[in-house]
Amino acid sequence: MFSLLKALNAPTGPTTIIGTALVQQAIEASRMSARKRIILPFHKGPEAPLHRMLNAIQPFSYIRPHRHLHPPKPESVIVLQGALLCIVFTSYGAVQEAITLASGTDEFGFDCEPGIFHTFLALHDDTVLFEVKPGPYQANADKDFATWAPPEDSGEAMNFLMSLYLLEKTKKFSPKLF
């Protein structure tokens, strides 16, 4: 049975120990998610000025390329477990950069300024990120989705996702993937 849940409840209390138990909780929920990913927030609500969270992602979870422009928000992620392909696009959909980030390696995190189109692809089962970006969260304004990338629930999303996974294998960038 798959869940449509996008986020777990934040831990209660004024402090939270981030350890194996919370990581495992996020992983288990991501495995049960229809989207193959789940957020475990540490901030106590969408109005919080700083959002901190675990993002557990399974392979073949489609995170539609997006940027944080309206309002402008920087974003940082650190790979705690597993590996992902981080892809940066031009505003027209051409791949500008594709880099493998993995825990325990020399390249394990990503930071971007507002307005940069990007996405992440999990390369290993149970990949877990620590993510930070400014709040507050407003569902209709949090992400500016790339119009050249298919919506998450569209029939074209899986073909587009597979073309992105090919980047990791070939490291060849086409001028525009879709």
Image (cartoon, rainbow, N blue to C red):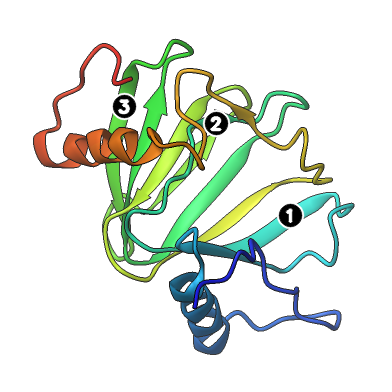
158 displayed left or right of 1: left
Q: Which residue is drawn at 48% across and 81% down?
A: 28
Q: Name the amino acid type tagged 2.
A: His
Q: Position of residue 85 (x, y in %)?
A: 31, 45
Q: Which residue is drawn at 85% across and 49% down?
A: 49
Residue at mark 2: 66
What residue sits 29% from the left and 21% below the top? 177
Pick out the residue farthest to the left. Answer: 170
Kind of residue at badge 1: His
Q: Residue furthest bottom?
A: 21
Label 3 packing within 10 angstroms: few (<14), some (14-19), many (20+): few
Per the image, the residue denoted by label 3 is: 97
Of mark 2 and mark 1, the one earlier in the sequence is 1
Task: Identify the image quadrant of the C terminus.
Answer: top left
Picture coordinates of residue 176, whole percent (x, y): 30, 14
* Residue 70 location (% of width, % of height): 75, 24
Label 1: which residue? 51
Instruction: Please name which of the two marks, 2 or 1, marks the residue nearer to the observer.
Output: 2
Which of the two discs, 1 and 3, labels the residue nearer the N terminus?
Answer: 1
Q: Could you give the CA–CA distance between mark 2 and mark 3, rounded to whole angstroms? A: 15 Å
Q: Report whether residue 90 is seen.
A: yes
* Residue 56 visible: no
Cα–Cα gap, marks 1 and 3: 26 Å
Nearer the viewer's eye, disc 2 or disc 3? 2
Secondary element at image label 2 = strand
Q: Residues within 10 Å of mark 1 (few under 14, many from 20)?
A: many
Circle on res. 107: none
Compare marks 2 and 3 and give the one earlier in the sequence.
Answer: 2
